[in-house]
Amino acid sequence: MKKKVLSLLVSGCMITGMLMGCAQKEEAAQAPAVAEESETETTEESVDVSKEQSETEEVEITYANFNASGGNEETLDKMYQAFHEEYPNITVKIETIGYDDYFTQMQTRVAGGTAPDCYELNIENFAAYANKGVLAELSGIDTSGYNQTALSAFQVDGKQYGVPGNFSNVVLIYNKDLFDQAGVSYPTNEWTWDDVMVASEKIKALGDDIYGIYQPITFNEFFKVSAQYGGSILNDDKSAFTINSAENLNAAQMMVDKITVSNIQPNESQMGGLGDWDLFESGRLGMIPTGIWAFNTFTEACDFNWDICVEPGGTQKATHFFSNSLVVNKDSEKKEAAATWINWLASSDAAAQMRIDAGWDLPAISNDTVLAGYLKITPPQNRQAIFDSLEYLAKPPIIEDYSKMADIITGKLSQAASGEISAEEALNQAQEECEAQIKLQ
């Protein structure tokens, strides 16, 4: 298999609301209201962790997070207790804040100079905070235990400003029973959208209420599919929109034609009020690209055989990636201890095993022994595809008016999906509206 990492705007990545089980939630990055700082000033605030020093100095640090608020406070506390046994001189005061309030609070605290020593950021907010110069560079930590592709998502201009506390991604989930009935070979990691179309047509032929695939017509899906066809939403330096490029038109046309031309994907009326997961659980949908957080639900709800593979590609592979970063406050007076804590929390075997045992998303680590237990859980049989997908990260184009850009593009694509306008008109109109309403750097 050809393995190619797509470096699509290193400064940003996917919406972590999806990590919390909301597959269509799109959140705008909330940049902290602080003055811009030069690259030199930011680099000077790097963290150089000395293990000898971290083991001898008595220090208390503060750590804020949101991800544990979904019922994992107890697991996080167990992790801290294990950390404190290893580093008894470091006391961590943990503050868990609900996701809905977290970023508003953090924005205010960073601007007011009261931010914690270290904290959690979803990945698009990571980009905004890093670009504002409020994060310390983590130049002195041991990063050998991480999955290096996941680690790279939190680099800016080659410098490490955060570590991946966890990760989740999207895979292609498919109904093996429908594939068997249609006489079609199961999808593989090498499949392209052309392969999906052929299989979907045969599955669609099984019945009027059976469909080959469901893929949401949203900005989140579009920027990923555009990457799969070699396109992007912005140019390399984010100075211009490239929404209506030829590559993007190929992507949009494919997405829309599945509904308006071949009807291998149901339109809104044919969905009859069902959600895409509902349709899959009913046994009437052949394939659905969705997050690995669907596994438990599908295991309980589906009375048919199903499995997964890496998302299909167009001219190349690209797959959704979601992660929360753990970062150190540039203005903290306890950077070394803070970096020691977040690095242990994100990459130690002990913390990773606790996370896996609790079923609390996945650690972004490279230790195959620790991950072996997770890979053995079925269904799905092919859990390795989750980690294979990390070779093809597609990161969204984070800008200050991210939400407005996403709304404009989603709205135009929705019009194309309903047949009101063509895919080409949708992209041309989105290009014009974004240029008129959004000021880029």
Image: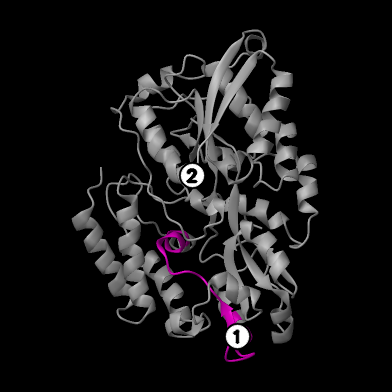
**Which residue is tagged 1?**
210
> Can residue 141 be seen here?
no
**Which residue is tagged 2?**
99
Q: Is residue 264 left or right of residue 55?
A: left
SS under mark 2: helix
Task: Tell me which colouring the rendered structure shows.
Answer: one colour
Q: Nearer the viewer, mark 2 or mark 1?
A: 2
Q: In the rendered structure, which amino acid carries the disc numbered 2? A: Tyr
Question: Residue sitting at 47 percent across and 61 percent down?
Answer: 24
Q: Quadrant of residue 176?
A: bottom right
Would residue 275 be counted in the magenta stretch?
A: no
Q: Nearer the viewer, residue 213 or 282?
A: 282
Q: In the rendered structure, which amino acid carries the disc numbered 1? A: Ile
Q: In the figure, 59 relative to 309: above or below?
A: above
Question: Residue sitting at 51 percent across and 70 percent down?
Answer: 215
Q: In the figure, 56 relative to 119: above or below?
A: above
Q: Earlier in the sequence, mark 2 or mark 1?
A: 2
Q: Quadrant of residue 156?
A: top left
Which quadrant is the N terminus positioned in?
bottom right
Q: Is residue 274 left or right of residue 232?
A: right
Q: Most extreme residue toward the left, as rendered? A: 436
SS under mark 1: loop
Q: Which mark is residue 282?
A: none
Question: Residue sitting at 36 percent across and 19 percent down?
Answer: 41
In percent of width and height, residue 89 lies at 66, 12
Assess disc 1: are there few (<14), some (14-19) or many (≥20) residues with their C-alpha within 10 Å of its C-alpha. many
Q: Nearer the viewer, residue 14 or 345?
A: 345
Q: Which residues are magenta?
A: 200-224
In percent of width and height, residue 127 lies at 42, 39
Q: CA distance from mark 2 to mark 1?
A: 37 Å
Assess disc 2: are there few (<14), some (14-19) or many (≥20) residues with their C-alpha within 10 Å of its C-alpha. some
Would residue 212 be counted in the magenta stretch?
A: yes
